[in-house]
Amino acid sequence: MKPSSRYTINVLTTGLLVLLLFSIVLCWSRKICRVIVYTGLIARRTAAVKIQPSTLVPQLDSDPNVIRQSHIHAYIGDVAVFYGFGLLQELVQGPPEMLASALFYPVKVPESKIGGFLQGEPLVPDTDLWRLIYFDEKLRLFVYCDVSRKTYAGEKSWTKKINFYVGPKGFAETLAKPVGRFTDPVISRSRDGFRFTTGPLIIFDKKHARFFKIEFEQQTITKGPQLPKDYRPVQINGLVKNDGVLGPITWRCPYRKPTQQEIEERVEQASKRGRPGAYPDMPPVPMCENVGPYPSEKHILVLDESGQVRLLDVQTLELTGHAGHLPVPPPYKQDEQLILDDLFAYDVKPFTINGRHAGTICGSVSKEALGIRVLVFDPNGQLLTDRRSLAMPENQPGGPLLLTITYILENLQPPLFGLASYLTASSFEATAGHRALFILPNSFVAMSARNPDGQSIRLRFCFAMLIISPSIVLGLFLAWRVTRDAKTIGLSKDVRRYWAIATTAFGLTGYFTYRLTRPKLTLVTCVNCGSLRRPDMHTCHRCGSKWLVPELTAPPWRILDDQRRDDQPVQTIDN
Amino acid sequence: MLALIKREIEDNVALFLIAAIMATILVPTIVYFEADRQARIDSPRGVSRDMFEILMVLLPVLLSFFAAAMGATQMYSDRSKKISTFLSTLVTTRSRILAARIIAGVLAILVALLPIAFTAVILLRLYNVQPASSIYIRFFTRFFLTTFLSVLACYCLGLQFGWSTNKFLPIFGVIVLSPVLISVVVIKGLGLHTLVLMSLFIVASLIRVWQKFTSTSL
């Protein structure tokens, strides 16, 4: 291999290793700052929304006896930090294969005998029979089977008996009967993806463009009406992304003064218990009978890819109405188009009174997890309340210092990545952006690109350049140092130019790479110019003079052994 | 080549023993936890939380330090004892010596990792019905692949730091940079991103080590 190729490969591989390791160190430093900012300054404090009265139960809130009106509370929780770590998310939530596909639901039979849960598993079963429902990805069918445990010679093993397969056309005990195939179905799920019952399962099939309801016990399948081909639901029931980031959204019922009769009853009960005179001050009485953020009996909520929330009639499988929509959170403008991938978290809760749909609460968190917005809709999907909150960590004690450190750390990244962060600010999914190593979608420069405030492209670009100017200045300074040093050690003009460009683009990474791959030479003094020169080069790289080597002419005398001396004529040196 | 690999194994037999002991301790531990879960909780699906934590936290941390230490030890003992200098006088090349060394290193990692991976797969098949077993096996395949590449990356890091005459540089480098490298898994998770980053790191490291190893004067 040529020395020049060897040098190039060495530089490239060293550069890659330095880039990776240095980026990891910077990433952790930023993460530490971020965790402090979130847990100390943002979570539960600055980014919070409280709506009082909640506007969902005006008849209760306007009661003259009400002491405290109902309210809705949402805030950005500490959990937001967890979603910035891929491994922690998998540890907390379990295998994503299980969660994402919602493929597998074991149901204990009978369900009523489940005696509680331990680490997500039912405790001490009363029977060995389980009912198992899952979507077989290869067959593209739902499979309904019984699972029982058998003991042979002291060894226990699970036995699965498939009862039937379910396709769009119906039920079949064997695969011989054609029941059609589902294609990539969106399956309804509860907020806790693992809980499931043998009750109706509602799915949306993209190819058939309609909803299906499968009732396993009754062995019936109901088809909904055909929907437009471009209708794309994302979630059915349990509409949530990054659960827990939004608090969760809670609704608190109104409280009223106790009536005289209630006070008397309470005093009487206390007397019966042998404690007369106890409980003289009766606390307010909650007015929450059959009211709250519970699922409706007749409808479930469906979220589509445009962020619209619709009501689906469980009986007819028709989309009966508009229930609301996900809000565009601050700092973004309300009229901006909503993209689900741009939301770090969302949560949609149905509100019911006596089992009937009575409203919807929709909340979302911005890409950087700084802004929160909550919308409240009436049963007809009309907006009742709109509240927003944007965390301002810079206004909190210690906030400016933490933000300054974060800014400095961001500027230690290569300027090229700063520019790339600006150009690709909106290209990354929100949660993935929180795990970025190289291009930082949540950096100051990326935020400036996403939040234009009506500025022209040129102005925005200038502002972005101003934000990353420290890294550019640092890159230029390091490039100057590298060029100067490269000249000292005699690197060629072309190589010096490449190093200057690379160090300007990659900043500290380029500089570290240069220091690690710099040719290790001991320079000698040039006889001609007096500067240091490389001993392995033909000419001095400063003055171009050649080596002043004494002429190697053979001396006229020789020392010869005896035999050869006899053969050679003797030369006499005359003085 | 086989003779070279055999010699590498013989030279590092203590490290191979440590790898085997690690597997011997961890395999019965995860079997115990999984069997215990089955005895307490009667469910056709699921993984013991303890087994999950041992595999996801303890195994990568232990193995990455072990692999980094092994790489550093191999190269440092070569440099200090002039093993490759001696071997170069025989009918072999430095590239072959390095290849044999890396193969021995990978074998040591596999000695620790494979028994645990096989045990996990057998347990999942035994205590889970389909399709849960397939889903979990898919997840654990992803996990073991990520762990293997991360551990191999730490091994390559050890190889780089080990080629030094300074006694403290390999120790310092391995202790400081191995956790930094393995922390990519914490940030990125067990997905494709981690696999790509680790693969790039391994390729770059091996090229660099090969260049250094073959160009250093005897």
Image (cartoon, coloured by chain):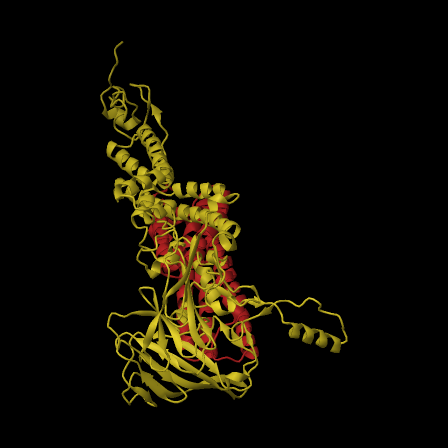
Chain colours: A yellow, B red
Q: Position of residue A169 (x, y in %)?
A: 28, 86
Q: Is residue A527 above or below residue B79?
A: above
Q: Position of residue B191 (x, y in %)?
A: 38, 61
Judge whether residue B93 can be spotted in this image: no
* Image quarter in which the C terminus of chain B is found: top left
Q: Is residue B92 above or below residue A289?
A: above
Residue sticking out furthest to the front: A64
* Image quarter in which the N terminus of chain B is found: bottom left
- Left or right side of A497 for B45: right
Q: Position of residue B89 (x, y in %)?
A: 36, 47
- Left or right side of A168 for A91: right
Q: Is residue B107 above or below residue A499?
A: below
Q: Is residue B55 above or below residue B157?
A: below
- Left or right side of A273 for B82: left
Q: How many marks?
A: 0
Residue nearest the observer in this picture, B70 or A364:
A364
The residue located at (33%, 34%) in the rendering is A476
The residue located at (25%, 21%) in the rendering is A551
Residue nearest the observer in this picture, A273 or A99:
A273
Judge whether residue A107 can be spotted in this image: yes
The residue located at (39%, 41%) in the rendering is A411
Residue nearest the observer in this picture, A321 or A186:
A321
Residue nearest the observer in this picture, B57 or A313:
A313
The residue located at (52%, 72%) in the rendering is B48
Residue sticking out furthest to the top: A575
Q: Quadrant of residue A277?
A: bottom right
